[in-house]
Image (cartoon, grey):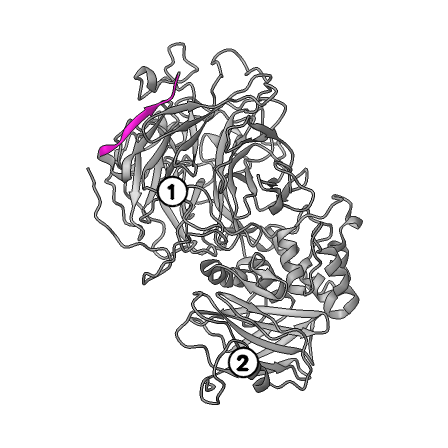
Amino acid sequence: MIPIFGPARLIFFRKLPVAVTAITMFILASMAVGLPVHAGQYPYSQTLRGTVEGNGHAQRGYTILLYAAEAGGHGNGHVLGTARTDVDGKFKIRYRLPHGQQSILFVIAEHGPVMLAGAIGTSANVRHEVVINERTTVATGTAFAQFVDGRNIHGNTYGMINAVKMAENMANPENGNIGEVLFNKPNGTETSTYPTFNSLTNVVAGCVADDANCQALFVATTPEGGPPPTTVLQAVANIAKYPSYPGYPTDTDDPLFQLSLLDPVNQPALTKRPTSWLLFIKFNGGQHNIYDPFNLMSGPGQIAFDEGGFAWINDNYRPTFSNEIACAGQRLIKLYPWGETFPGSPYFGGGLSGAGFGIGLDPHGKVWVGNFGFEAPACADTTVDPMPDPALKIPAAHDSVSVFHPDGSPISGFDGFSQGHIWWPQATVSDKKGNIWIANCGNDTVTFIPKGKPRHARNIAFPGGRGEAGIYAPTIPDTEPNSDAPLLKPFAIAIDPKGRAWVTANQVGYVANSGMADPTEAIGGVYRVSSDGTVETLSNLDANNVPVLSWPMGISGDSKGNMWVSNSNSVKVPCVDPLDPQDGMDGPSITLYPADDRAPSNHIGGGLTIPWGNAVDGNDTLWVFNFGQKPTRNVDENTVWPDTPLSHFCGADPSKCPSGKSTGDPISRDIGYVSDALDRVTGGGIDPSGNVWLLNNWKKTGPFGPVYNTNPGGNSFVIVPGAAGPVKTPLIGPPQSFEQPGHRRDHRKGHWGHSPRRGYDRD
């Protein structure tokens, strides 16, 4: 098959006779893309030397193809050369990179049904020696899972470029060894991710050893109702996209696990099947697994991505040693799209103070952070040493947002921006017009900042809340008889296609001091707010008048305006009030609010365990981030804390879900995608490569009194490569896949996603 190229796209050759030489291959490719063929067009200027290894041995007689796929989408991909491995598995290709374009380089090695592959870099970082083996194959197939399509690799610019470095986290293309990130702490032997990766490489090793195992791999990775893969790379990609095999926990029902036992050349590997084959790669800014004041983060709460996929994370607390009192966090963290800490990060200033669930980017690339004021009780009551210290935000003020330039320099001053009666702010998001919406958990209102101009901020009160009564700064918790604590507790915000803000309210209907909430009644509300101040109270009952909300937390919209709510069934948000875990209806769930205003519906399963945040991917399917298993009350030092799952649900368009799934059906199994890399997760998101990011906000032991009263904050985040439909970032309004029109291209100089500074109204 003649290769046909397009934007950020390449198509592999089918198997070619050995007699086809490199120059013949190049001439055919040149003819296919309409290029003039003459000896001087691409004079050789570089040489790639490599080795193909498989099943622990050098592999001879493999056909090697070197490709450059354009990342910018303005020209054609190019076949740069071909070769054949010798008796020692070695090959050499002389080539020249196409002029004037950013390209991604792949090496494909084929022999019969066996395919080994590697993403070996970009034109900006050219390698001259590579090793292609099972590790590079699994790393490439996983990192590029959303872009592998049979014999095609194609996708969006940022997602493709970023996937190169993500693959390097798992395998080193220069020597074929395990990647440093996966090999070292906090991964390595600390979690099951490294053994899971090795088991996948052993599956490929079995294919190298016996063609029949390749066919078994193709059968095992055929999605329900979908076509079987025809290449090993597609099979590996399918594992990331369809990671859970029916029949768990019976090992014999998982053919991938059985294949991994045939040639277990890479160790350590799994000795029993996992709950899913997803790879949960853990990051904490270093190669350690300890808690101390030098940690990068403490209590990461929520995440936002810029246009290039760079991640911005807020955090709750100042890093401390375990069981040392932690006051309000005062840092903003920026990360490369592959998890590495960005130079100069973390950033300080701007009034940062114990941020919680509030972070977002506006259309100009500015970062907005809601300063909820998380802190240990001893900081709040000023019994901590030092005594009240305004310079360290002791105690926290709970009354501001902070704003930062894309380069991390603060725009807001030491006290942040507090206009608009901000009080215990949680979600902080922008709409497409640059209006900023802030959920004030502490006074039952939202603050609306038109065009991001704080001096024009105004407050919008919810019916029946404290703000409607003119109480904008409650301080007396609901444990006191004269309490003025919030009654509704706005928490999360999502913007619909009409620019309206959908806001969850965590405890609508709860009556303080009456014992536990009635589990037969809905607890929580959803409001729809327009920029003119109109507030609509939406139903919390389904078409049969059955409650659909139970202590709701996160909310996300899909591309059509359907809204998904996470029902924690447990969390009573501690704004003004102290921590007070609850028990709601039958169990945790998610609620769908249709865009056409039909009655909401409730959905369960998929491993939901105190669901907190959620995110819709480029396929309009829903990913739910779980705070982890109960118990969260009546715990002690002997309590066993189960591992935390990630949950996945079919969205409003079943055509984008696995065969046989309907709207609201769980895609993940009943226990979810469980990983020992996860602690207690609050926030997360989907990036342009289709990676799922999850924030370990709390330690698993966080609910235990001595931990909660000092520093329950986690110090890490997790990336699951290639699992979700890629999303255009920043997420401002409804999510967009890269198949939808209207994607903004970034033609600016400098690193991806940095916006030029513009004038800003500080008043």
Above or below, 552 relative to 643: above
At which x and y percent is residue 486?
Answer: 39, 20
Instruction: Answer yes or no: is residue 331 visible.
Output: yes
User: Which quadrant is home to the N terminus?
Assistant: bottom right
* Label 1 CA crowd tier, 10 Å (few <14, some 14–19, many 20+): many
Magenta-tinted stretch? 456-463
Q: Nearer the viewer, residue 360 or 154?
A: 154
Amino acid on which the number 2 mark rests in the picture: Met
Q: Earlier in the sequence, mark 1 or mark 2?
A: 2
| Residue 99 screen position, x and y as percent | 41, 77
Tell which of 509 and 363 is nearer to you: 363
Going by the numbered disc 1, the residue's amino acid type is: Gly
* Residue found at x 56% / y 42%: 623
Is 66 on the left-hand or right-hand side of 531? right
Which image quarter is the C terminus in? top left
Nearest-to-viewer mark from 1 and 2: 2
